């Protein structure tokens, strides 16, 4: 079945259901999450070790329609979790074709779209967003401005269009309005300057933003999610108290609780499938690599606030494989072998065996 391409066709399609006409993004996330839970489907694909800790908190936050923040040290899959939220969005979301802020055809916000519907009526063109297009991510840096996030008046647009600066048609929308009807994620929130964090107050409490220099209020439909490293609260910045008060749920992430979980994550993330031949990484080699990371996290010489990222065993695994490639490559080319296997030297194997007995 082809998708409706005009407003008239849209009004005669399943998208015209009252439940879907003005459904908010947080309601959409909630409904699709409930469908997954009822079908006993995994909520997030590729997230290992969080089934009994982080995932239940995420489910609670989404069911509560909260804006939320993930707090955790580096390498704890915070960005991956935020990006995985797109899996809870509808496959297609209709919007007025060409609209910068993806206006809902049934309730347009911007002046351009309202004028277009007035002029074209049922012949107004409709386009569709896929889930990945409804996710906007911004890495917080000290040089981010209100214009970047919210928007500003664009004098060049005014000059080219022959508009007055006071016209709504001269507004240049920032990232937040462009994330309308989607998910807006800010990574490393404490790095955002305090005066810029203030600019997020309205969208998180009243649900609207005010464009600088023009008396316009846009009641945007956005789910706000954040990530932060607790160490950064004092090292580089902080989350100001009024903004923190507006974040509904605070969710703590953590490193793998067991070596087996660490091995599973490393096997999932490391580049182990090299071109043209099969690679075999023995289980004891994987365990050696993973236990190095666990030992480092427990070592008193390691700063607990900085942590030992899961990227350490991932990188080490890739180096082990590359070392095996380097050492067997000449023989492999001569014999045309199709498999490569890693092994410990006799001295390393004896040290490993002693370490295991000591534990």
Image (tube, helix red, strand yellow):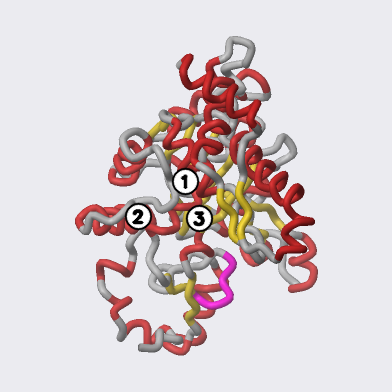
Q: Measuring 69% from the left and 47% from the top, which residue is drawn there?
A: 324
Quadrant in the rendering for residue 17: bottom left
Q: Measuring 48% from the left and 75% from the top, which residue is drawn there?
A: 128
Q: Which residues are magenta?
A: 96-100
- Which secondary structure class fits the magenta region best? loop
Q: Name the residue carrying label 2.
A: 29
Q: Name the residue carrying label 3.
A: 218
Q: Report helix, strand or loop for mark 2.
A: helix
Q: Measuring 65% from the left and 26% from the top, which residue is drawn there?
A: 347
Q: Residue furthest top?
A: 300
Q: Name the residue carrying label 1.
A: 81
**Crowd class of label 3 (few under 14; some 14 to 19; many from 20; radius 10 Å):** some
Q: Report helix, strand or loop for mark 1.
A: helix
Image position, residue 258 (x, y; %): 41, 30
Side of 107 where 241 appears, left or right: right
Q: Measuring 50% from the left and 55% from the top, which residue is drawn there?
A: 218
Side of 140 where 79 appears, left or right: left
Side of 290 where 122 appears, left or right: left
């Amino acid at each position: 079945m082809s998708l409706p391409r005009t407003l008239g066709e849209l009004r005669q399609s399943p998208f015209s259901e009252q439940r879907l006409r003005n459904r908010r993004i947080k309601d959409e996330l909630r409904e699709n999450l409930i469908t997954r839970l009822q079908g006993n489907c995994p909520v997030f694909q590729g997230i290992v070790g969080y089934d009994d800790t982080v995932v239940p908190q995420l489910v609670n936050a989404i069911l509560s329609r909260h804006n939320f923040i993930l707090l955790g040290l580096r390498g704890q899959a915070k960005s991956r979790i935020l990006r995985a939220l797109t899996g809870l969005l509808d496959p297609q979301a209709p919007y007025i074709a060409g609209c910068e802020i993806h206006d809902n055809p049934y309730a347009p916000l911007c002046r351009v779209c309202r004028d277009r519907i007035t002029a074209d009526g049922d012949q107004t063109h409709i386009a569709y967003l896929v889930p990945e297009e409804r996710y906007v991510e911004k890495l917080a840096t000290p040089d981010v401005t209100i214009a970047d996030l919210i928007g500003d008046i664009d004098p060049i647009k005014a000059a080219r269009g022959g508009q007055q600066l006071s016209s709504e048609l001269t507004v240049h929308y920032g990232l937040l309005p462009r994330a309308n009807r989607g998910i807006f994620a800010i990574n490393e929130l404490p790095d955002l300057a305090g005066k810029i964090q203030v600019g997020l107050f309205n969208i998180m409490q009243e649900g609207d933003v005010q464009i600088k220099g023009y008396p316009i209020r846009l009641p945007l439909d956005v789910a706000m999610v954040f990530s932060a490293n607790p160490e950064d609260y004092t090292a580089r910045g902080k989350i100001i108290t009024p903004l923190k008060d507006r974040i509904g749920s605070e969710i703590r992430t953590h490193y793998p609780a067991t070596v087996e979980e660490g091995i599973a994550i490393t096997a999932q993330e490391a580049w182990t499938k090299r071109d043209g031949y099969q690679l075999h990484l023995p289980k004891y080699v994987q365990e050696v690599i993973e236990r190095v990371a666990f030992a480092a996290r427990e070592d008193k010489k390691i700063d607990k606030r900085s942590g030992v990222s899961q990227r350490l065993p991932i990188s080490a695994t890739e180096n082990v494989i590359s070392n095996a490639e380097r050492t067997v490559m000449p023989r492999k080319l001569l014999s045309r072998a199709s498999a490569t296997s890693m092994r410990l030297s006799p001295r390393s194997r004896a040290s490993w065996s002693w370490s295991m007995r000591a534990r």
